[in-house]
Image: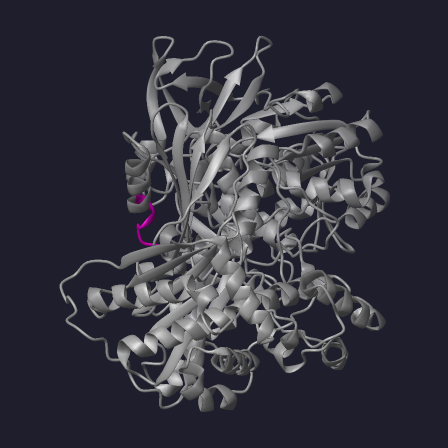
């Protein structure tokens, strides 16, 4: 760069808005700042964090740091204070370059001069070698904490030689738009400055299609780097925005062949390069010039050939694989990082030495699987499956994300909150349409149509998605007609202030954080899979679902306020492959043990995935999801998305309107205050282990009798079953005043997921008689609880004092989550709870044949086994004899 400054001092180096910095100015100013940094104590081998906004000062500062012989690390001012301080500490920094007035960083600060600064006499830049540290890139260590990847000068410089993987020169004009801490920022900056081109600093959070058009038209931009997802977005939004470019570099994730094909067809003369490489090998390890024929390859777009100064080895352990043989992609050469700061053990594990061609070679093991073809081109074959533990982020997700035409957040995520609302004159039409779809008609109040809370949840969810705003279930119960709900919608806008990446938690979710590692919050989904399953594709599907659902890649924190922080840095869980089991039962048991491992929402660990092989072409597969991120209906959503990602290799991110919370408490207070504690007959077993489970199958005739009684009492199936449950509970315990916890859907949030909360339904007097009047009384009590339902169970319990509900009843009116994997046979296996949120749970599950299953789970340390068995027997007997009962 200094040579360019001497030969062409007036050539533009940096352009930011209306400001242009020439190479001569850049060189002189960086020298002046470097001299002052040296006076401040910066020396060769130091690591200097830079906390400045994207702009010309940032570039001058990092160049000045290099001239002192130190390495720079770029920090993002959008990070929370604790993360900034943690990174500074991990770097071992003695000084931080930042704006004047910054504090709380844990080190001395130095701010750039406010005006021109002369270069002191006798100043010379500190000499360094190619292996001296130059940059520190920041990634996640798998728990949300920063991982510092230290790379040398040669790692960056090797990439931008003449006759390299792309054409860079004095003519080059390239946007500088990548996140500061990424190695892609080095690609955009140093490819230009090391070849005498112009860096166009983008002051927007990301490069849009309109921004790209403007960069080409007004500044002569001729080359651009884009992540695969952002490339897809611009292709969908404005395919002609690329017009005028000579080269487009894309990567960072497996590419969408459909988007690439559209680009190549429209812009055949533009060079399109696919770049592959984890941060540990600095920017790119391989590149491939994409042709139209590549879009038809069954294995996807190739990774290509090594870039200058880089060697690729496909290894089976330490043995080089033959052409066409799949092995682990291992990278060697000048691009390798020095290692992970402060983690010598991980450095030794990931940067290993192997003997190749009779010599000892240092390689980075990516964990990616690949194979060479006959032409010496590298192809990606998936991810290496590891047993147990979280693996490090390798930098190349195994599945692409398709980008629909939605606005994006500053991090490139789709932002549903910025979509325009439907015109208000259409609200009534949408409400009526949704009533008809869910309930079959729209001319009567919701409460008179035999629908329960689950139908209410579906109706409000569908309305929320169509209107782009929250529709709480409680509002449906308060305004149960089409006209009433429409009037409420037209009178309110339903907006909730929040950032795109941070969502405040509801009280129901906050309660989970008081015991974050408790297993009562685990939601288990397990299947038996028969056929030739591809474990690598299954793990890739898990990763795709993780990226598509904000609640699964969020960190849940109590302070400063209970909130979910959604971040692309939260890695997906690995697919833990267990040792083979002798039979189906043993595989399910082993899977249950693996999925019972603690989850930690505060570290972004909200789900597990495991696979237990058994026999030939058979395995048990399951996931455990923390209830703070997933509950109720989205179990079907998650399983459907897993299947889609496995079958098609792509998945559209899901976004939901934000929840509305904080409704009046008085109604719920009057309902459940003063409920006496249940007294279970018999002796409990204080030394017992986990929950006990009882199940009873109920034939389709029982379902028919329940529905007949619901129709005759103008209620719903839930009211009938809850009334019978309460009646039997009263008989067993002798209590005539009960509060039963009823799971009810509350609302949806983009980081907080779909969460059911417990409503306290008080049943006493005539509601416990077990007759038609009791059914009607129960229905009324449920409606009252739902209408007051914006105050969830944990908050009510906190105000009233425990116990609020010792028993939970749930009617699960959804089918078991299916997992339709192409070419395979799958069967869902319902797992008992690992722990309980109440003393006894009674649940009724639908079956495909029209029958139902009654499942009773209880805590034997509190509920005597004989009492639980008597309750289950009475409930089952009452349901079996319902057809002969005077009730009908």
Q: Taking the image as drawn, is residue 561 in sight?
A: no
At x 67%, y 36%, the residue is: 192
Q: Nearer the viewer, residue 868 or 556?
A: 868
Q: Which residues are magenta?
A: 594-599
Q: Nearer the viewer, residue 248 or 764?
A: 764
Using the image, determine if residue 599 lies above or below residue 499.
above
Quarter of the rendering containing residue 646 = top right
At x 73%, y 21%, the residue is: 291
At x 62%, y 57%, the residue is: 655
Residue 851, image x, y percentages: 48, 53
Q: Is residue 663 left or right of residue 672?
A: right
At x 68%, y 54%, the residue is: 408
Using the image, determine if residue 666 lies above or below residue 469.
below
Quarter of the figure with the N terminus: top right
Q: Residue 393 lies in magenta, yes or no?
A: no
Q: Is residue 733 left or right of residue 207?
A: left
Q: Taking the image as drawn, is residue 272 in sight?
A: yes
Residue 492, image x, y percentages: 72, 80
Q: How many marks?
A: 0
Residue 560, image x, y percentages: 44, 73
Colouring scheme applied when the structure was drawn? one colour
Residue 83, image x, y percentages: 44, 60
Q: Nearer the viewer, residue 41 or 93?
A: 93
Quarter of the rendering containing residue 442 = bottom right
Using the image, determine if residue 823 lies above or below residue 593.
above
Q: Is residue 331 left or right of residue 258?
A: left
Which secondary structure class fits the magenta region best? Answer: loop
Q: Residue 595 lies in magenta, yes or no?
A: yes
């Amino acid at each position: 760069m200094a040579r360019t400054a001497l030969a062409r001092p007036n050539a533009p180096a940096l352009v930011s808005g209306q400001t242009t910095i020439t190479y001569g100015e850049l060189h002189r100013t960086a020298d002046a700042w470097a001299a002052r940094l040296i006076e401040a104590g910066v020396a060769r081998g130091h690591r200097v964090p830079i906390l400045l906004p994207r702009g010309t000062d940032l570039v001058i500062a990092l160049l000045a740091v290099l001239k002192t012989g130190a390495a720079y690390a770029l920090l993002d001012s959008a990070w929370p204070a604790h993360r900034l301080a943690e990174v500074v500490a991990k770097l071992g920094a003695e000084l931080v370059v930042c704006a004047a007035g910054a504090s709380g960083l844990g080190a001395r600060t130095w701010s750039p001069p406010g005006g021109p600064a002369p270069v002191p006499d006798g100043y010379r830049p500190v000499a360094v070698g190619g292996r001296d540290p130059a940059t520190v890139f920041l990634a996640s260590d798998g728990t949300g904490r920063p991982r510092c990847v230290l790379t040398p000068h040669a790692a960056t410089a090797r990439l931008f030689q003449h006759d390299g993987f792309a054409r860079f020169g004095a003519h080059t004009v390239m946007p500088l738009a990548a996140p500061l801490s990424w190695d892609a920022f080095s690609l955009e900056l140093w490819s230009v400055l090391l070849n005498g081109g112009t860096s166009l600093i983008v002051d927007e959070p990301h490069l849009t299609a309109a921004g790209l058009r403007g960069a080409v038209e007004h500044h002569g931009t001729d080359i651009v780097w884009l992540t695969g997802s952002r490339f897809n977005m611009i292709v969908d939004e404005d395919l002609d925005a690329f017009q005028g470019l000579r080269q487009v570099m894309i990567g960072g994730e497996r590419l969408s062949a459909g988007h690439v094909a559209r680009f190549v067809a429209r812009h055949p003369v533009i060079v399109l390069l696919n770049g592959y490489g984890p941060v540990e090998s600095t920017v790119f390890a391989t590149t491939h010039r994409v042709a139209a024929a590549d879009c038809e390859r069954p294995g996807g777009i190739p990774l290509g050939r090594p870039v200058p100064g880089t060697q690729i080895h496909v290894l089976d352990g330490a043995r080089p694989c033959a052409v066409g043989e799949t092995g682990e992609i291992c990278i060697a050469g000048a691009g390798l990082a020095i290692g992970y700061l402060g983690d010598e053990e991980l450095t030794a594990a990931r940067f290993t030495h192997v003997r190749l061609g009779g010599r000892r070679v240092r390689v980075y093991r990516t964990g990616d699987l690949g194979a060479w073809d006959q032409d010496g081109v590298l192809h990606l074959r998936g991810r290496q499956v590891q047993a147990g533990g979280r693996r490090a982020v390798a930098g190349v997700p195994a599945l692409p994300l398709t980008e629909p035409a939605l606005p994006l957040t500053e991090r490139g995520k789709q932002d549903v909150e910025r979509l325009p609302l439907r015109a208000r004159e259409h609200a009534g039409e949408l409400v009526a349409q949704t009533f008809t779809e869910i309930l079959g008609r729209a001319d009567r109040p919701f409460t008179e149509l035999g629908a329960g809370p689950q139908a209410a949840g579906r109706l409000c969810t569908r309305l929320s998605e169509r209107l782009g705003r929250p529709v709480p279930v409680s509002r449906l119960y308060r305004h149960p007609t089409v006209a009433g709900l429409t009037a409420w919608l037209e009178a309110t806008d339903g907006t909730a202030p929040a950032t795109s990446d941070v969502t405040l938690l509801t009280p129901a979710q906050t309660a989970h954080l008081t015991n974050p590692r408790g297993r009562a919050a685990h939601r288990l989904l397990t299947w038996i899979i028969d056929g030739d399953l591809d474990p690598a594709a299954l793990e890739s599907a898990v990763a795709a679902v993780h990226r598509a659902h904000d609640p699964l890649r969020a960190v849940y924190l109590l302070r400063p306020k209970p909130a979910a922080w959604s971040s692309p840095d939260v890695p997906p869980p690995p697919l833990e492959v267990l040792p083979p089991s002798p039979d189906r039962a043993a595989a399910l048991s082993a899977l249950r043990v693996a999925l019972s491992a603690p989850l930690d929402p505060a570290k972004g660990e909200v789900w597990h995935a495991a696979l237990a092989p058994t026999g030939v072409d058979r395995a048990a597969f399951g996931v455990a999801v923390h209830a703070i991120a997933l509950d109720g209906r989205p179990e079907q959503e998650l399983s459907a998305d897993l299947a889609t990602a496995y079958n098609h290799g792509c998945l559209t991110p899901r976004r939901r309107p934000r929840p509305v919370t904080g409704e009046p408490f008085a109604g719920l207070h009057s309902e459940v205050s003063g409920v006496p504690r249940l007294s279970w007959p018999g002796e409990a077993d204080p030394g017992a282990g986990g929950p006990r489970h009882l199940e009873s199958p109920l034939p389709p005739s029982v379902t028919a009798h329940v529905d007949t009684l619901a129709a005759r009492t103008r209620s719903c199936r839930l009211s009938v079953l809850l009334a019978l449950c309460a009646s039997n509970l009263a008989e067993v315990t002798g209590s005539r005043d009960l509060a039963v916890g009823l799971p009810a859907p509350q609302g949806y949030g983009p980081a907080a997921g779909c969460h059911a909360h417990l409503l306290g339904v008080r049943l006493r007097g005539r509601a416990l008689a077990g007759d038609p009047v009791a059914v009607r009384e129960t229905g009324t009590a449920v409606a009252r609880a739902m209408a007051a339902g914006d105050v969830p169970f944990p908050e009510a319990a906190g105000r009233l004092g425990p116990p609020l509900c010792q028993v939970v009843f749930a009617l699960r009116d959804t089918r078991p989550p299916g997992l339709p994997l192409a070419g395979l046979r799958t069967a869902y296996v319902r797992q008992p709870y690992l722990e309980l949120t109440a003393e006894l749970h009674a649940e009724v599950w639908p079956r495909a044949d029209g029958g139902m299953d009654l499942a009773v789970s209880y805590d034997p340390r509190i509920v005597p086994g004989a009492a639980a068995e008597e309750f289950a027997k009475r409930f089952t007997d009452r349901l079996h004899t319902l057809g002969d009962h005077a009730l009908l």
